[in-house]
Amino acid sequence: MRKPILILVLVVVAAFFIFGFALSQEEKGTGEADTVKKEVAQEDTTQKEDTTKVVYKYVGNTWCKTCHNSEGKGKIWDKWASTKHATAYATLANQESKKIAKEMDIEDPQKDAKCLVCHVTGYGQPTTGKYSLEEGVSCEGCHGPGEVYYTKHGREKERELALKSGFVPQPDEELCVTCHNKKSPTYKEFKFKEVFTVIEHRTPEPEKK
């Protein structure tokens, strides 16, 4: 009887050891990602971690509007709000979208990942409390998740920090075609240079005195 009991004890001990090791590795990975974020936030330009592997959170358009809806900033937020990007989520509720969804065996396009992945910025990604699906394709859809950079990208001395933590000053065609492609059921020929003029916005240059 002693031998089977001894074997059982050894199996239990080994199981606990394996579980503990796996858990420690998971915590280690999470800790490393957090460390990179902290290093970036502290403007540590000597860190050599691959920051492209760090997942930053989407913070939502509320933060963008705070600064980017003034005359001095060129009413950039209003410019975005006037585009189809701003209503991308709401569009999924219209009759045409429901008709297309039915043909694709999708019950509700506003709840299906196949639709939301392109009609909502940051869908399925880490977000903060102010993020909302209703924002559609928002600022962060083109400029990257703003968890770290949203308070810093406008300050010249912190520009490098913003770029290192996910800020994209201007989107390119490669980014746009991740959604504007033939996989879309409503796809039309995508002419990047032509359509970019519709969403393009810039902060006005300060007047020279």
Image: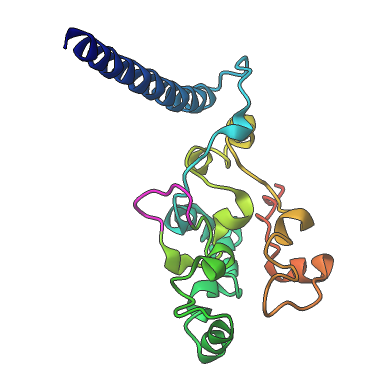
| Image-based side of 95 in relation to 171, left or right | left
Relative to the observer, which residue lies in front, 182 or 58? 182
> How is the model colour-coded?
rainbow
Total marks placed? 0
**Vertical comparison of 20 with 185: above or below:** above
- Res. 18 image quadrant: top left
- Res. 17 image quadrant: top left
- Image position, residue 114 (x, y; %): 55, 68
| Image-based side of 28 in relation to 121, left or right | left
Of the 4 image quadrants, the one containing the N terminus is top left
Whether residue 127 is in magenta: the answer is yes
**Vertical comparison of 61 with 82: above or below:** above
Relative to the observer, which residue lies in front, 106 or 201? 106
- Image position, residue 66 (x, y; %): 44, 55
Relative to the observer, which residue lies in front, 81 or 154? 81
Q: Residue reaching furthest front?
A: 1
Q: Which residue is drawn at 24% across and 17% down?
A: 8
Q: Residue at x 71, y 68 (%)?
A: 180
Relative to the observer, which residue lies in front, 205 or 50? 50
- Image position, residue 141 (x, y; %): 59, 57
Whether residue 75 is in magenta: the answer is no
Q: Which residue is drawn at 48% across and 40% down?
A: 151
Taken as a whole, is the magenta stretch helix, strand or loop? Answer: loop
In the image, the segment drawn in magenta is 124-131
Q: Residue at x 49, y 77 (%)?
A: 109
- Image position, residue 177 (x, y; %): 74, 62
**Vertical comparison of 179 with 155: above or below:** below
